[in-house]
Image (tube, rainbow, N blue to C red):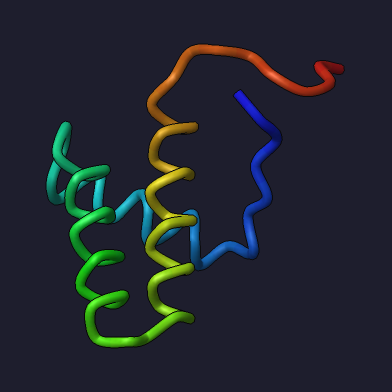
Amino acid sequence: METLYIAGRAALAEASDLVERFGEGARREAAARAESSRDAGNVLRFCHWRQIERVIATLSTDEVFGTVH
């Protein structure tokens, strides 16, 4: 997995909220929100929801990546 940049605490909070509300479907929900934002021409929200989708994917894996201290 590539290195993930998380813009801030709000991204983690939103990802956690989606996981809590949608469970296994959280990634699909984030992707749907990204697609809806893209269709509406809202590039900033599209990028936001794509990042949330990647955060959820990272939180859902047991894979270790990057430097481990």
In the rendered image, the residue lying farthest to the bottom is 41
Using the image as rendered, state which of residue 40 and residue 31 is in the foreground. Answer: 40
Figure quadrant of residue 4: top right
Left or right: where 62 falls relative to 29: right
Q: Position of residue 12 (x, y in %)?
A: 49, 54
Q: Position of residue 36 (x, y in %)?
A: 20, 73
In the rendered image, the residue lying farthest to the top is 63
Using the image as rendered, state which of residue 40 and residue 56 is in the foreground. Answer: 40
Q: Position of residue 49 (x, y in %)?
A: 38, 63
Left or right: where 28 falls relative to 60: left
Rendered residue at 33%/87% (across/down): 41
Figure quadrant of residue 34: bottom left
Figure quadrant of residue 14: bottom left
Q: Position of residue 30 (x, y in %)?
A: 27, 55
Rendered residue at 39%/41% (across/down): 56
Using the image as rendered, state which of residue 57 and residue 12 is in the foreground. Answer: 57
Left or right: where 57 falls relative to 66: left
